Image: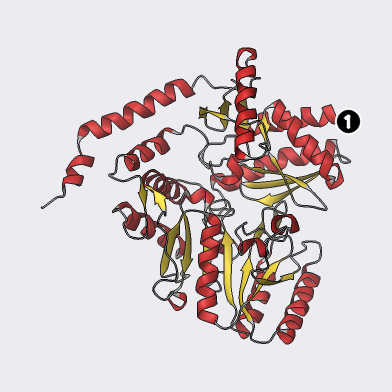
């Protein structure tokens, strides 16, 4: 059977030997990273100088004094000052398989030796169709019927592309519906959807957005009644002017507020009466629930028109049905993703799909339950300090100090100094959030993180 030169190249035993050697070498050095440790005094001065210089050049201070050294071990990461910390925010959701994972590295090397650094709209390599097939296969696991996928360089560009497809289909409708406290991105247009005024300061108005109340787990029927009332008011006030509703099914930026199937179905049913397309934004929730997609977790397979994915997927994309297929020229991108990212994406998604991560007894759900139990015990010990946890799957949020912003921020900085990286989210209340590196995290990691959380609480009371 005729083969390409590339097939012979990739099957060359020297390529496999090189991948194995690199992965083994990384693993040998990564294995020295076994626990949290403070910075090395001899490295501190040069590290602080590098941080100061970098912050000045980028035009603003980094949130944390974080510059990775380039190596880690699973959920642990080494910084360039020699300190080691538990990474339980994972780059706000990017490092699903933690740091220096040998199989991810081998996948990256496989992609890196392809003949170009970046794939783009005009030229894709043979690895792109393979990844597309995997993602669409997973999206259609329960018969959703998605037909297409467009790869792009960032989550917000996936959001932009979904909006453009919807506006073209629904023209001249131009308004958008979204949930209060949502986050969708910070481009000139999508920043109008993200419900945070600071992200729009000084920007011109580009989109007309109207907000809906999100689900309140303490008032199920009231949540449905309120959102339907608001929807009907909007449809009466702006008839035939809505093109899309943008739905985060689990609100990450707000601190992991979890929606409800009946709530979402009621909204979608009303929107469909008015020819409003349903966009589900899964840039943060993809691969983090006990189903591959959050829309599957909520049983919305037949109800969604477009889905945005990113972060955990390593490459970002818009998944959509044939009836939303854009006309030529509407969406394009010179850079879509690198060969390394495409190859790593295939490994990660396939690993989660095939090796015991999903389902009631899957690793994601078990990690969630274990961490939630640990945090519940802390709530019982310190009920005035810590409330929660909230969230689902690999997404966990806490309310600290009654949601006070300054105190929550202080807590995350002390936690960082003590060896655990988390982050704040939301306003009134502010929450402390964690994104478990589910690809590598163990119960031992969660034990250690929980201990450091408690030690940090004790520091502040």
Q: Is residue 344 above or below residue 324?
A: above
Q: Nearer the viewer, residue 280 or 261?
A: 280
Which residue is the extreme one toward the top? 42
Tag 1's secondary structure?
A: loop
Residue at the location (51% across, 77% down)? 168
271 displayed left or right of 347: right
Looking at the image, can residue 417 be seen?
yes
Q: Nearer the viewer, residue 324 or 450?
A: 324
Residue 51, position as x, y percentages in the image? 62, 28
Quadrant of the drawing holding the C terminus:
top right
Q: Is residue 83 visible in this depiction of the protein?
A: no
Residue at image mark 1: 461
Q: Nearer the viewer, residue 94 or 219?
A: 94
User: At 66% across and 37% down in the image, what residue appears?
Assistant: 62
Q: Is residue 407 left or right of residue 278?
A: right
Q: Is residue 146 left or right of residue 237?
A: left
Q: Which quadrant of the figure has residue 103?
A: top left
Residue that appears at 64% across and 20% down: 37
> Residue 87 placed where, x, y %?
61, 34
Residue at 74% of width from left, 82% of height from top? 232
The image shows residue 346 at horizontal and vertical percentages of: 39, 49
């Amino acid at each position: 059977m005729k083969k390409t030169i590339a097939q012979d190249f990739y099957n060359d035993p020297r390529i496999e030997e090189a991948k194995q050697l690199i992965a083994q070498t990384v693993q040998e050095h990564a294995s020295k990273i076994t626990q949290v440790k403070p910075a090395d005094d001899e490295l501190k001065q040069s590290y602080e100088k590098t941080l100061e210089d970098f912050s000045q050049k980028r035009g603003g201070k980094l949130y944390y004094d974080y510059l990775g050294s380039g190596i880690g071990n699973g959920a642990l990461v080494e910084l360039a000052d020699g300190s080691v910390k538990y990474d339980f925010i994972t780059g706000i959701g990017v490092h699903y398989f933690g740091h220096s994972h040998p199989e991810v590295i081998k996948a990256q090397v496989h992609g890196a030796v392809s003949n170009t650094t970046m794939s783009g709209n005009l030229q894709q390599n043979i690895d792109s169709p393979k990844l597309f097939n995997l993602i669409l296969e997973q999206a259609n696991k329960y018969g959703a019927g998605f037909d297409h996928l467009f790869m792009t360089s960032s989550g917000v560009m996936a959001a932009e592309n979904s909006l453009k497809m919807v506006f073209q289909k629904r023209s001249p409708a131009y308004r958008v519906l979204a949930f209060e406290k949502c986050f969708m991105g910070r481009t000139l247009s999508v920043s109008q959807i993200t419900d945070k005024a600071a992200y729009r300061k000084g920007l011109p108005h580009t989109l007309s957005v109207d907000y809906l109340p999100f689900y309140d787990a303490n008032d199920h029927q009231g949540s449905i009644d309120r959102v339907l009332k608001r929807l009907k008011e909007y449809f009466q006030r702006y008839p035939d002017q809505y093109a899309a509703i943008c739905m985060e099914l689990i609100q990450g930026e707000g601190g992991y507020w979890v929606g409800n199937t009946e709530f979402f179905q009621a909204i979608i049913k009303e929107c469909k009466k008015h020819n409003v397309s349903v966009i589900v934004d899964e840039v943060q929730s993809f691969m983090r629930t006990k189903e591959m997609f959050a829309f599957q977790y909520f049983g919305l397979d037949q109800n969604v028109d477009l889905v945005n994915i990113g972060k955990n997927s390593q490459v970002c994309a818009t998944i959509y049905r044939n009836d939303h297929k854009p006309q030529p020229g509407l969406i394009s991108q010179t850079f879509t993703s690198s060969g390394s990212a495409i190859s790593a994406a295939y490994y990660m998604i396939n690993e989660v799909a095939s090796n015991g991560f999903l389902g009631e007894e899957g690793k994601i759900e078990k990690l969630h339950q274990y961490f939630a139990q640990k945090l519940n015990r802390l709530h019982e010990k310190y009920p005035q300090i810590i409330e929660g946890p909230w969230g689902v799957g690999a997404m966990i949020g806490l309310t600290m100090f009654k949601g006070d912003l300054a105190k929550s921020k202080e807590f995350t900085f002390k936690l960082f100094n003590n060896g655990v990286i988390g982050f704040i989210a939301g306003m009134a209340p502010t929450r402390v959030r964690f994104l478990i590196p589910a690809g590598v995290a163990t119960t031992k990691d969660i034990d250690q993180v929980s201990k450091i959380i408690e030690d940090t609480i004790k520091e502040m009371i």
